[in-house]
Image: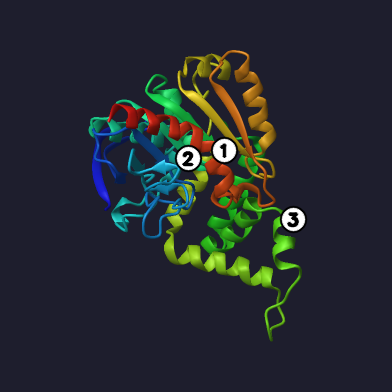
Amino acid sequence: MLQKIDVLNFKLESGKHKSCIPLCYQTFGQPIGLAPVVVVNHALTGNSNVTGEKGWWNDLIGENKTIDTNYFTVIAFNIPGNGYDENLENLISNYHDYTIRDVARVFWEGLFLLKIEKVFSVIGGSLGGAIAWEMAALQPYEIENLIPIATDWKATDWVIANVLIQDQILTNSNNPIADARLHAMLLYRTPQSINLRFQRSKQENLNFFQIENWLLNHGIKLKNRFQLSSYKLMNHLLKTIDITYNRKDFLALANEIKSNIHIVSVDTDYFFIADENRKTHQQLKCIKENVFYHEIISIHGHDAFLIEFEQLAAILNPIFNKQKNKNYVNA
């Protein structure tokens, strides 16, 4: 069930003041206060519905799954302005005023209002993983396990360049959401994945290719369920990823984070490339013992974190099973 908290008198990083930011969220599993808390951050077009009917991470979250709702309290916030509550008044038009840090701060405010100060894990893929990095930088002592997946702690020039292209399409196209989605899907997959899947096949009795139909359908589906202002905001947030902005350098900042850091990359990710995460891991190893690097091997590229569930479960199981066993012993 979708619930709402009002975050009052909030000052954005831009200096703008918001009298109220509605923060919608869902909880799954055990009641708050009775079990370790897992915060799950959604990606660009995602939402708080992480498990159950139409849950986008059903393969990982639920009863007897990797993140077992028999043992954990799972909380998933909606990024303000993502439109999942279907209240048009809560959409954000002045999206340039917002940053990833604003979102992370709002999420912490939500947790504090729920009387949660420490969490067992913050986990998220892509944009959600970047929010997880920022949440750890904001509260370096309060997260036991930080698990950023297919993401980075900063926006590279490559990410910033693609954000610009997306923004140009969203601003100038006559069919902005659908057209921007066409470009985005080619960032989220790989040539090898697409070529293997479609093999130049054509639609039966029609003179166009299956790949064209697949892309166009993705555009139509997103257009039917997503608001233009939401897409513009989420795309813009990608450009603002940088936990060091107006702070210390990365190693000094990361050294303050007491979480176990589990960096999960996809070897073929063409958006948040694995090389950047390998470099981050090598840097962190020099100053921290509790940092770990994991890599999903996949032909599918960035979206592998939504596809390669068996590999991801194998990476995550030791982290969550350790806590489950502790819960069982203490029961």
* Mark-to-mark CA distance, 3 and 1: 21 Å
Residue lying farthest bottom? 205
Q: Are marks 2 and 1 in contact (CB under 8 Å)?
A: yes
* Towards the viewer: 309 or 42: 309
Classify mark 2: residues with Cα within 10 Å, few (<14), some (14-19) or many (20+): many
**Residue 91: x %, y % from top left:** 35, 52
Which of the 4 quarters of the picture holds residue 225?
Answer: bottom left
Evaluate if marks 2 and 3 touch, with contact meaning CB atoms under 8 Å apart.
Answer: no
Q: Amino acid at mark 2?
A: Gly
Kind of residue at badge 1: Thr
Q: CA distance from mark 2 to mark 1?
A: 9 Å
Q: Residue at x 27, y 41 (%)?
A: 30
Residue that label 2 marks: 124
* Mark 2 or mark 3: whose residue is earlier in sequence: 2
Quadrant of the image containing the C terminus? top left
Mark 2 or mark 1: name the one nearer the start of the chain.
Answer: 2
Residue labelled with disc 3: 192
Of pointers 3 and 1, the one earlier in the residue sequence: 1
As drawn, is 238 to the left or to the right of 98?
right
Q: The residue tagged with tag 1: helix, strand or loop? A: loop
- For label 1, the residue is 151
Q: Label 3 crowding class (10 Å Cα cut-off): few <14, some 14-19, many 20+?
A: few
Q: Residue at x 67, y 29 (%)?
A: 278
At numbered mark 2, what does the secondary structure look like: helix, strand or loop?
strand
Horizontal side, residue 184 vs residue 146: left or right: right
Q: Left or right of 268: which side holds 303? A: left
Hey, which quadrant is residue 285 in on the image?
A: top right
**Residue placed at 46% from the left, 22% from the top?**
259
Q: Amino acid at mark 3?
A: Gln
**Horizontal and vertical percent position of residue 60:** 46, 47
